[in-house]
Amino acid sequence: MLLNAVVRWGLSSHAASSLSTLTDHHLPGIRETHAHHDPRTALIGGWDSGDIRFPRHEDARKTPGLVRGTIPGAAPGLTPPVRGPPAPPRSAGQRGKGYSELTMPWHILDLLVTNFALLVAGAFALSLTFKPGRVAATTLAVRAALTVASSFILLSHSLPLAPGLMFDLRAVPIALATYWGGARMGLALSVPVIAYRLHLGGNGAVPAAINLVLVVLISSLLTRLASRHLRSPRERTLSTLAAFGIPNLLVFAAYSAAGRPFGEALSTYLSITLLDALGLVAAGIVINTRQRAMDRNAALEQMAFLDPLTGIPNRRQFDMDTGGAPLNGLYLLLLDIDHFKQVNDTYGHDRGDQVLQAVAQVMQASLRGSDRAYRFGGEEFVLLLHTATAEQALDIVHRLRRNVAATAGPKAGLPEVRLTFSGGLVPLVGQASIDEAIQDADQLLYQAKGNGRDQVRTQTLRSGRTKA
């Protein structure tokens, strides 16, 4: 039907020109209109001037009482005007929806472009729900609602093909839902769409319902095959066509039930299968483009806020975490690995990198979930400890010292080396700024270094362990 309309338009250009000349010079009262749907002009179009109509040749052959002839100056075989009863008035909601106007290519193109635009907009809205990590239940609910809404909107902008038969891209969002949610998700979301299509009725209602179920089942099967067997672009292209080509075979049954010829059903089948496949590709491009953009953003964020060697947050992340956060209940530990230059000189810089990685791993394993570790640069690290008292903070610090001394060397491939660190511990409460706290911790760190290393100095006295 879609292809036939374009062909008929091209072949009838000479006749349309002759008719324009005729209406301008011989029948000035006649105007072109598409304001009503008449049984003798349905699907094939016609011109109306109240009670005068110019039906196409198909009308003259099929409708009793129509006399064929010629009009001077018009194309050979053009049917002359035929008197008939006036057309019934149409409501505002009926205007622009007759089959006659849809035979014009620009009306077909308008509806197709509208469907594609709505599909792309729906795909973009869906892409906003795809984020890295585990998907929350609320996100799935929003994604499902957007899928159903997209199909409903597409269905409300259908292109009529014949009485009771229509085309739109409603199956594409359902196919996408099957790809990301599986067959159960696809079938669940197709139920309201099928119910609405059955409510609209027509010869194509039941085949359309079956079509949507088949789209879900075939898309689910192709999703499983894609990860194992469908690897080349050709195979993936054929699978996309199959996702709609097989279900769309029901077009022939719908056209047969409507009494439409086989040739028209074939051209419609090929057209809508291609359009469905193109719609799926377009929607997939929109969603995949956004996912790639999110992956790039995540990678850039990781590069900006994580230390590439140890994988723990860096100084920039530390500044963000402490920039506007309340500092009450926090202790800051600035630590430095002892004799790290000697490790580099003795075992090489590659082994030194492994030592840094091992110490970072031990720190991450030794800290609680509320504590954070950062690499400031070189062999220097900063820890933020969420604790209320200095004794609790020192307990965490000394546990960390024991774990580093016992396990960091073997983790770095140096079982014979006992790795230690020195540090300065200060409370953040009462500090004028985070920079001032870092300066105080740095002074305590150098005191620990000068006092023999392998110790932590703090501004709070703890009997038998460290001194301010």
Image (cartoon, rainbow, N blue to C red):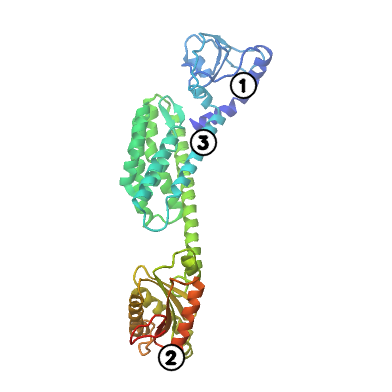
Looking at the picture, tell me which residue is in the foreground, 90 or 265: 90
Please tell me the numbered disc located at residue 15.
1
Q: Amino acid at mark 2?
A: Asn
Residue at x 38%, y 27% (from the top left corner) = 200
Q: Position of residue 443 (x, y in %)?
A: 48, 83
Q: Is residue 174 left or right of residue 61?
A: left
Q: Secondary structure at mark 1?
A: helix
Q: Position of residue 402 (x, y in %)?
A: 33, 83
**Category of crowding for the residue at label 2, using alpha-carbon neighbours closer than 10 angstroms: few (below 14), some (14–19), many (at least 20):** few
Q: CA distance from mark 2 to mark 1?
A: 105 Å
Q: Amino acid at mark 1?
A: Ala
Q: Quadrant of residue 392?
A: bottom left
Residue at x 38%, y 36% (from the top left corner) = 249
Q: Pointer 3: what residue?
A: 114
Q: Earlier in the sequence, mark 2 or mark 1?
A: 1
Dots 3 and 2: beta carbons under 8 Å? no
Q: Pointer 2: what residue?
A: 451
